[in-house]
Every structure is written in structure tokens, then in C-alpha cells.
Image (tube, rainbow, N blue to C red):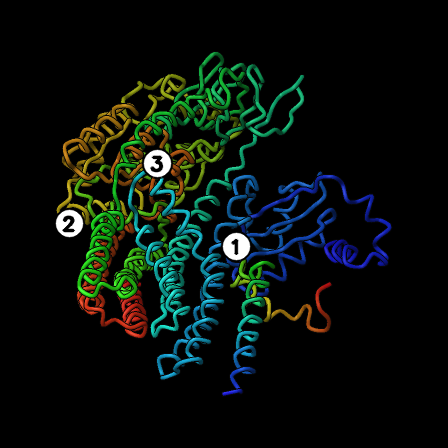
Amino acid sequence: MTGQTSSSAAACPGCIASPAEPARVTPRDAQIALSLPGIHCSACIATVERELNAFPGVEDARVNLTLKRAMVKAAPDLNARDLIPVLERAGYEAHELDPGALSATQTDKTGRELLMRLAVAGFASMNVMLLSVSVWSGATDATRDMFHWISAAIALPAIAFSAQPFFANAWGALRVRRLNMDVPIVLAILLALATSLSETALSGKHAYFDAALTLTFFLLAGRYLDYRTRAIARSAAEELTALEVPRATRLVGGIEEEVAVADLKLDDLVLVRPGGRMPVDGEIVSGRSELDRSLLTGETTPVFAQEGLKVSAGEVNLTGPLTIRATAVGEDTSLHQMADLVAIAESGRSRYTSLADKAAKLYAPGVHILAAFSFLGWYVYSGDIRTALNVAAAVLIITCPCALGLAVPAVTTAASGRLFRNGMLIKHATALERLAEVDTVVFDKTGTLTDGKPEVTDLSSHSEDDLQVALALAEASAHPLSVALARAAREAGIEPANLQDIKEVPGFGTEAAYNGQRARFGRAAWTGGEAENVTAAWLAIGDQKPVAFYFSDSLRKGAAEAVSAFQLAGKDVMLISGDTQGAVENLANWLGIHAWEAEALPQDKAARVQEMGDQGRRVLMVGDGLNDTAALAAAHVSISPASALDAARVASDIVLLGNDLSPISEACQTANAATRRIRENFRIATVYNVIAVPLAVAGLATPLIAALAMSASSITVSLNALRLR
Amino acid sequence: MEVLAYLIPISLFLGGIGLVAFLYTVRSNQYDDPEGDAQRILNNEWDDHPKP
């Protein structure tokens, strides 16, 4: 196996394989990432790795079952498209991933750093706690002092290392003269260390080294949970992005070459095959086809395309190959200009203050004032600065927002985990809180409430004869309308008629000879039918009057349930689409949505959502297209399906992984429950403070009471969060 | 109480070993694929000798 030889050669220079090594190690090995959604067991891992490693040119292949991915190190000329058939023969579905888009999760530096700090804080606090227990159980004099000194020797470096994120955050907030949750945390940790150190030096009775360390440990645990939840969502979202490898076929002197979309330049000739997406804005130079613009405009009826037509990046080519000359690339494409709209709309959302921030705003000054007053009170009462400082430190430690730091992340972790199992990715930290406040739901039509796939509506009104001919013609084309007709006719038990010389005329339809007559199935103008305002395909046999097959967009699974669930929950449901009046009205009536708007431009959508936001409504926007991105960003909270354009997924807070829409209403309920738990957790933390703070202010708190109260409240808060799972 | 003079260093040393071992596992990417590692142990392929 090639994988073996290369790694063993690295470990043992005397191996047989080593002479060949310098020749094979080229400056840049190709890193290929494959998504393997179907793998699930040890046999899958073994088969995939064996097949990949046996393929010539592969140096090392390693499967990651958690991420359902394989990373392959291979010779530079090897391509993912060479490997996919190998795996498909072995029975595994495989997709190419863009390694560039994956890089962020591959090197998870932040997560690893947090884990290191958590580990150091955990080990240190266990050791210090062990020493503290002996002090609490009665060690006195020299023994106690020695234990305190050892604790100090462990605690000081441990905190200097592991509490760095808090120091950095607190400093960041103080520098711009603001207060956040980290300021009281840092103050408590530092004051606890300082007073404990001076107490130890003066051989005093109470040292809070264990409290400072457990505090750091619990807070880091909260941070880590928070980070993990978002890292999982981010890596799944990144995988969606990475699945669309940005490649294009460039024609240079009539020769095709594969290039990255980023490398395309102005006036390049680009070949777009049927089913492919326009990589750049441009003008059609040759070829005839039809274009699906639904992701950009929401229109469901395909547009006829021929030489001279301007196309925009993101449109899908349906029937024939097109050659386009690039007129705008990269940042200048309409796709990117839409992203600018998003940036403008997004500035509104950053104004949202999370529950944790609200709590911190109330909490931080309160704690500082309380500690200052206890210090002053004790100083005036006893005249002893050491007692006063000790009491103030005890107050700060006891009130330290240990439970508050865990209250939000523990709940969001549990809730996100639950939603993830239902196929929803929570991308934004405060998305759940915002989702719980929603009172208005705005849906996009094409691709969101509907599949974006047409469906025949009047199959039964046609004669058997017509259907047989239409089926035979439809099966010769990959056009969405043809595919839909063929599927419906087959399901109805129709057999295709016997046709000769079937050929597809890109942009128009399919044509064949039927009993010596010409039979055509396609556009109205081509077949002699009358163009109407509804999606239709026409069948013309010989001199007979052409007949129309009508199509409507099929409803997405769970769409009706989601809409009625929202209406039952008392939320206003709206439909805003870029499609025609008739199509939107039909769907709205069918779903029982009273408020709808048709033919809305992207700017209109965003403006409408913004307007509702200004009226004080909390809008949930559900959309998938490029025309929705600005509205998605302007909304209070937004959801997009996995089939959405990359730009739309980036702009939304939650991504729906499956094809079913019904989890959305459930997500709202989970969000409500999560917000309720967060509030409960804040209350639990407050109750514990109400009990413990008077003790601390009265100077009765001991390190043992502080440790007990802190652990008890943190565990209660975490258990309360787990009820959500 | 002289026993403390041995016991405390020993306990700190053992704790330190635990910490170092954990840091080693983090650094060598052993938490990247927990599910895969749980499944790989069931694989017969490298039962006789370790994977080179």
C-alpha cells in the first residue's frame, strides 16, 4: 500500500521504499477532502481506506467518522473525480469537498486552546481541593500554612495560564470603558488570589485558592460548551459550502480547461453545461437553452436563452450547453453586489443584546457596589483593613457569576443538540433567544415553501394518446418540466408511444416523428400554442391543435404543517415572493395565508422586512434565494434550507438540513423552552446569591461555604439545562 | 506527620503525570474523531502488528 510505504519511510530512513521517496515527494501534495454521508461502522472505515489507499497516486487516506469525511493526501495530479467512482463502486456515496472552505475546522486552534486551559484548571483545582479538604477537616498551624503555600504554588501559575481568556475579555471591555461579565470574574479571581496570598503570609485561617480555581474551571467549562456548540454548527455549515466546489470550464482557443471560479477574468469564454450554474455575469456568445432564474428572482418559469442574452451569476442552465463571455467577475458580479445589501441590513442586527449581556449589565455594577460597601462598612466598624479586605473578597467570590457563566451555554448546548438531531443547525449564538421572541413569520415561495420543482396539474384531462406521445418526448429531455411530466405519466401507468428520430432542440423542446407526422413537445411559440401566464408545456402532433400541460410548483414536505403550526401559535404568517401574481395567490390560498405579496424585488423584500422590524415586530424570515439574502439579514432571525444558495445560508442564523419544513415550528417551541430555562437558571443563581451573600457580607463565609455554594449552584444550573434534551 | 513530606510530592507528581498525558492526547489530535476511534477498535486489520 502506498500509504504504508510513505509513512514508514519517514519513520525509518533505511526502509526499502526510501530510495523512491525523493522522486515522489513533489513540492505540493494534493489534499483532497471527500464527504461520505453514508459511512457508519468500522467495516465502512476499513473498506473506504483500503479502496482509497490502493488507488495509484494516493499517499495516505484517513477517514473521520465523526465528521463523515475522508482526507486524502495524494500526488498533485490526482483529482477527486478520479476517486469518487472508486468509492461508488464499493457502495459508498461520495462528494467532493472544497478543502479551502474546510480549513477553519481542520485546525481547530481556539477549541484546543480552551480545552488545554480547562484541563490545567481542572487538574489544579482537584489538587488544591485535596489540600483544602485537609485544612477544612482540622489542619492547624504549620501544617495549614504549608498546605496554603503549596496551594498557592499550584494556583498562581495555573490561573495565570488558564484564566487568560477572561483577562483578555475584561481588559478589552475596560479599555473602551464598558463593563461585561468578565470584569467581576477577573476582579473576584485576582482579589481572591491577593487576599489569600497575604493571609497565607500572615498565617491566617482562610485562603480561597480552591475557590479561585474551581471558579475558573466552571467558567471555562461554560466557555468550552459554548464554543463546541458553535463549532459543530459551523463545521456542518462549512461542509455545505465546501460541497459546492467553485469550478468553471474555460474555453481557450477552443480547448476546454477546468479552472477555479476565482481565476476567471473579464472576457474569458466560459462553457456552462446543462444543469450547471453560471459562475460569472456575462453574455451568451453561442448556444441555445433555457435558464432557471428562481434562485435570483423567485420566478419559476424558465427563461428562453440565446445569443446576446445577458446572464447573471447564480442562474442555472437547463437544456443546452451555453458559451458565455464574462462581463463581470468576482466582486463585481450581481451575486456579490447582493452581498453588499446584506452587509447594510446586517448592521441592524448587531444591536440585539443577549439575555446574558442584559444580566451582566445589571449584575456587574451591583456586585462591585456591594463589595465596596462591605469593605467600607467593615473598615468603619472594625478599623482593620485586613478584615475588611477579606470580607470584600469573600463577597466577590460568593457572588461571582459562576452559575451565570454556565446558565446560558449549558442551555444553548442542550437546545442546539436537540435541534441538530432534528436536522437544524444553529449558527448564531443568540439565534435561539431571538427565535423565541418572533411574532411574525415571512416565507419566501420558490425553493422554500415549494421545492422549486414543477408538478403536472392536469394530467387526467388529456387523452391516452397524447399522454403516450408526450411521455416519449419528455423522456428524451432533462428539462425540469419534461422530467416532471415523465415522472407523473409513469406513475399513472402510461406507456411511451413508439417514436422515431427523437431529438432535443435546446431552448425549445423535443421533436420526433410519430406515425409519419411531426410531434413536438416544448415552448408555446415553437409548438404553435398560445403563451399564457402560467407555467405550461405544449404538445403538437402533426396538424392537430396543440394541447397544453399545466404545471405548478410542488409543495415542500412539511410546508403546510409549518404554516398552520405558526398560525395556531398566534403568529402572523406572510408570503413575499418574486414570482407572478397568479402563482403566489394560488399557493397563499392553498396554504391559508392571507397576507401575500407577489413580484417583489430583492430590495422590496428587505425593505418590507425592515419596515415591519421598525414597527416593533419580531420577524422570522424563511428564504433560500439570492433575492432573499438581504431580507434574511434584515429580519430579527432567519432560517434557510440547505438547498439555499451559499449567500443565503451565510446570511441566516439557522440552516435547515433536511428537506422537511416542519421542524421550523418545533424549533420555535424549543427556543421558547430554552429561553425559559435560561431565565430559570438566572433565578436559581440569584436565589443562591440571596442566601449566600448576607453570610459573606456579615463576614461569616468560609472557603468551605463558598466552595459548596459554588458547586451546588453550577450543578443545579447544568442539570436544569439538561431537562431540554 | 512526616509522611506528608512523601505523600504530598507523590500526589502532585501523579496529578502532573495525568495532566501531561492529557495534554499529549490533545496535541496529537486524539479527540478529532471520537466515533471513528470507537469503531476502529473493532477492525481486524491491524490485530497482529501495529499500523506502521
Determine which quarter of the picture holds residue A262.
Answer: top right
User: What amino acid type is highlighted by mark number 3?
Assistant: Asp
Q: Residue furthest top?
A: A308
Q: Mark 1 vs mark 2: tell me if same chain.
A: yes
Q: Which is nearer the N-term, disc 3 or disc 2? A: 2
Between the C-alphas of marks 1 and 2, the distance is 37 Å
Chain letter of mark 1 equals A
Tags 1 and 2 touching, CB below 8 Å = no
Evaluate whether residue A539 shows in this view: no
Query: Which of disc 2 and disc 1 is earlier in sequence?
Result: 1
- Callout 2 secondary element: loop
Q: Locate the N terminus of chain A and report the quarter of the image it occupies.
A: bottom right
Viewer-proximal residue, A505 or A35?
A35
| Residue closest to the eye, A114 or A469 | A114
Q: Tell me which chain the residue with mark 3 is part of.
A: A
In the rendered structure, the answer to whether residue A544 lies left or right of residue A77 reads: left
> Residues at marks 3 and 2, common chain?
yes
Please provide percent x and percent y for residue A648: 37, 35
In this rendering, is residue A585 above or below A143?
Answer: above
Q: Is residue A303 above or below residue A74?
A: above
User: On the rendered structure, is A155 left or right of B9?
Assistant: left
Spatial CA distance of label 3 from label 1 is 25 Å
For the residues marked 3 and 2, what is the alpha-carbon distance in whole angstroms?
24 Å
Q: Residue beneath label 1, please?
A: A68
Task: Write down the quadrant of residue A29 in the picture.
Answer: top right
Residue annotated with mark 2: A569
Q: Which label number is shown at residue A624?
A: 3
